[in-house]
Amino acid sequence: MAAQLILRAVPPFPVPPAAREALDNVELARAHGMAPGPRAAFLAGRVAQRQFAAELLGVPASGLTAAYDCPRCGPGSAHGRPGYSLHGVPAPLLLSLSRSAGWVLLAAVPDPPTGLLLGVDVQDPAGADFDGFDDVALGPAERASLSGLSAAALVSARARLWARKEAWLKLCGTGLRTAPDALDVLHHPGIRDLPPAETGLPARFAAAVALSGMPDGAGRDAYQPGSGGSASS
């Protein structure tokens, strides 16, 4: 049976104190060391993710315990692949989160089959609008694919490639410990672009999802899309 991918885009929102108090100490401790702007964005993402997971699991958000898993540091770290435990047992929900320009993009697969991995990413093209981006972030074939593009079209294409890279690196759990220019995502079979109509994100954003176990050439049809769209959490 195909895995069901569920997406949610969350517009910028202030985190109320009550929602912040529902977060775990490991999340609050990580936020404490951040500057005010990044801290607000981090907390908004964690609150939105917790509420998203609670809705999908049909439980109170306060009943979830954060359970991040970093392939390098192991389970129980303050970072890595997101997840939750419920009554001491891992919740049957695969999660991924991305933030850009105040927006949060959430992805989930309920009751995932063993071994399935998930990564999602969203990018505001403004973040890719600087000299030297191509040399640092893109491989030879990817740079060649941008030939002839300029202005807004070039920046949008860069953002699309970067979203695809980030989605795959989140799936792998390696993050930018993997050199981004060494990862070619032009035709990667496990990665799919996410159009705004599916995510509910502003049209200018680029977004992508990666799922392990996708057969070659089946990036679009390897899962059954679930409910997408935006929600103000």
Image (cartoon, helix red, strand yellow):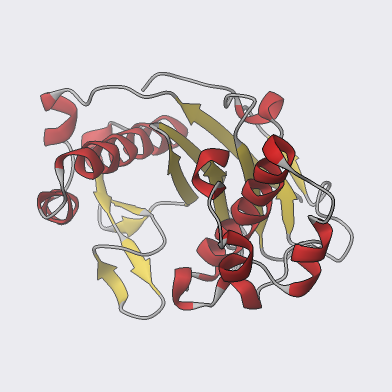
Image height of 54 relative to 186, above or below: above
Q: Percent from the top left, x then y, of residue 133?
A: 57, 60
Residue 81 horizontal side relative to residue 112, left or right:
left
Q: Quadrant of residue 180?
A: bottom right
Residue 132 horizontal side relative to residue 18, left or right:
right
Marker count (numbered)? 0
Image height of 149 relative to 231, above or below: below
Residue at the (38%, 54%) spot, across then down: 83
Residue 100 horizontal side relative to residue 14, left or right:
right
Relative to the observer, which residue lies in front, 221 or 104?
104
Residue 76 horizontal side relative to residue 97, left or right:
left
Residue at the (66%, 58%) spot, across then down: 211
Could you tell me which quadrant the C terminus lies in?
top left
Q: Is residue 124 visible?
A: no
Q: Percent from the top left, x then y, of residue 92?
A: 47, 52
Residue at the (70%, 24%) spot, across then down: 197
Image height of 70 relative to 108, above or below: below
Relative to the observer, which residue lies in front, 98 or 176?
176
Relative to the observer, which residue lies in front, 105 or 155?
155
Q: Percent from the top left, x then y, of residue 134?
A: 64, 63
Extreme-right residue of the structure: 217
Q: Is residue 161 visible?
A: yes
Relative to the observer, which residue lies in front, 61 or 189?
189
Q: Percent from the top left, x then y, of residue 39?
A: 20, 43
Residue at the (38%, 32%) spot, across then down: 102
